[in-house]
DNA sequence: GTGACCCGTCGGTGCGCGCCGAACCGTGCC
DNA sequence: GGCACGGTTCGGCGCGCACCGACGGGTCAC
């Protein structure tokens, strides 16, 4: 029996890499798609540098992370989109945690993140969800039979050449559940390409951490491309910028 | 920071459920979509019943498995398609293992499995891959922008009503890498519905273990529906049926 | 009722591994 | 050259847990 190509031991070894609180924290932190140094990851997870060093060795030899050494720094990234999706899926299945109380400071710090941020290599937050909703509403996407790009959508993307074949086993387009909005934003090869394009055009720029902001030029440009007004893209509905602290 | 809805500890707890060789074996065995008894799983994994019992408790309370008690038996199933996909993805990322040598007896026992079997709730093996290939070739599916059902495909399915909305977050249609063929077969809501339909029509029937066979009536019927000949659906290319016992 | 069987619980054992601090090495700055 | 700093290696500690065997309780067959 067991026509399974993978046996239990191999699966267990892989799962064991993520079965530690510290290593899991590393992977979640790296979901932002950036390269972190070993020290940054150690501090973020609250462990000694020596501890982090050993964990990182295991994650790299296990194939989940790749490293890049520069001078006395050791930069670490997730090994690829498929690893990012694996971590995402696993995190999605874990009990929500939904920590009950957050400090006001933390909430305010997250305001920028809730508006727009990277989710590995694509765009998340209210802006990411809005992008998906608008593309659906304008007939650029079709979700009736899985999420697909319509002919109109292909036109709309214009010059954006999507490496369809280069995708390997990664889906061209898929939904990715947004942590803050609890609704899907765009992921997959096309989601990543679209996000990268917005950065290349200078419409988006990186803020602190994973946060992303619309540039002064990018706001009207993106609004125009989507057939929206600039206020539709405003960072806050009304409370946040004006409301102050209550 | 950490706008992640799931913290490292929660992810680690979930991963830890699969980070044990025995528990991983259980989940892989249950990927056939059937309900196994505790004793069967214990024997398959090669551990004492008492050990299995404790592992099963953890998997059930962890939400990966559901149990159903009947008399003195305890039946266990995967908690749902999303869990099955999670296990599949994880197994797909684990180093292939690809055990080098297999006994002839084991190879022959797998012959039926290689032809057709269930993969959780959909159809796998040569027959499953053939089904996908043929549907693509006949324009019933389109893989240019993710795998989707074409209008022609919708007609072809006819009475098969697909619970599109009931799918929740499960994709309507997706590829699932076939262990024996190393090529994709159909999964997702539609893959499952199609497989169930073939059983309901009496075209397919269960063999031993995960194996599946075409019924005498099912062979011509399926061939006709796909525009193929019955020999196209033959269980073996030439060696197996004619070869006898050697 | 008696026996076979499936399953759960309870001690006890031993390995694995996650953690740290201390010492060490190489890089980059002054 | 000297020093600060990021990262790694090495012991050593202690918890957690996977395993089993033995026992007990519930279920079905005869």
Image (spheres, coloured by chain):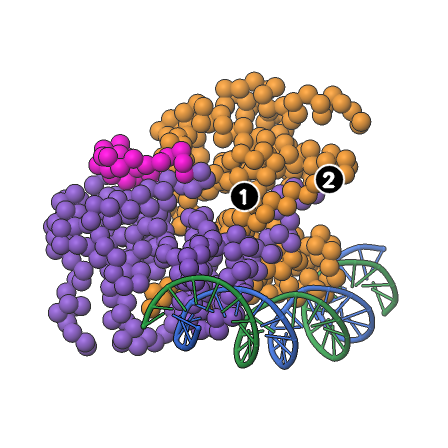
Chain colours: A purple, B orange, C green, D blue
Q: Quadrant of residue B178?
A: top right
On the image, the x and y values in percent for residue B157 come to 43, 30
> Which is more N-terminal, label 1 or label 2?
2
Residue C25 or residue A69, whichever sits in front: C25
On the image, the x and y values in percent for residue B109 come to 73, 37
Chain of the residue on which disc 1 is drawn: B
Residue A36 or residue A204, whichever sits in front: A36
The secondary structure type at the circle numbered 2 is: loop
For the question of whether residue B14 can be seen, the reply is no
Task: Please count the marks in the image.
Answer: 2
Residue that numbered label 2 is attached to: B101
Which residue is painted at 26% across and 37% down in the image? Answer: A160
Give, as a single range, the part of the protein colored magenta: A140-167
The secondary structure type at the circle numbered 1 is: loop
Which residue is painted at 32% across and 36% down in the image? Answer: A162
**Magenta stretch encompasses residue A218:** no
Left or right for B209, reference A70: right
Residue A54 or residue C27, whichever sits in front: C27
Labels 2 and 1 within one chain? yes
Q: CA distance from mark 2 to mark 1?
A: 29 Å
Left or right for A184, reference B191: left
Q: Quadrant of residue A46?
A: bottom left
Which residue is painted at 74% across and 21% down in the image? Answer: B242
Residue that numbered label 1 is attached to: B121
Quadrant of the image containing the C terminus of chain A: bottom left
On the image, the x and y values in percent for residue A150 come to 28, 35
């Amino acid at each position: 029996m067991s026509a399974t190509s993978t046996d239990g031991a191999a699966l267990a070894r892989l799962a064991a890499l993520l079965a530690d609180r510290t290593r899991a924290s590393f992977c979640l932190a790296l979901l932002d798609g950036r390269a972190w140094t070993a020290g940054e990851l150690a501090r973020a997870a609250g462990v000694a540098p020596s501890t982090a060093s050993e964990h990182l060795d295991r994650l790299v030899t296990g194939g989940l992370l790749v490293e890049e050494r520069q001078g006395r720094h050791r930069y670490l990234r997730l090994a690829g989109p498929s690893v990012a999706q694996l971590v995402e899926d696993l995190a999605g299945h874990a009990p929500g945690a939904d920590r009950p109380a957050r400090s006001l400071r933390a909430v305010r710090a997250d305001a920028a993140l809730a508006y727009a941020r990277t989710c590995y290599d694509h765009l998340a937050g209210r802006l990411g969800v809005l992008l998906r909703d608008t593309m659906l509403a304008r007939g650029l996407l079709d979700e009736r039979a899985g999420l697909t790009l319509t002919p109109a959508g292909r036109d709309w993307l214009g010059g954006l050449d999507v490496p369809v074949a280069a995708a390997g086993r990664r889906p061209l387009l898929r939904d990715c559940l947004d942590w803050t909005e609890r609704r899907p934003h765009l992921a997959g090869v096309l989601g990543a390409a679209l996000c990268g394009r917005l950065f290349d055009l200078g419409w988006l720029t990186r803020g602190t951490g994973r946060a992303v902001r619309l540039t002064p030029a990018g706001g009207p440009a993106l609004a125009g491309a989507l057939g929206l007004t600039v206020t539709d893209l405003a960072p806050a509905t009304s409370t946040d910028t004006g409301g102050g602290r209550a």
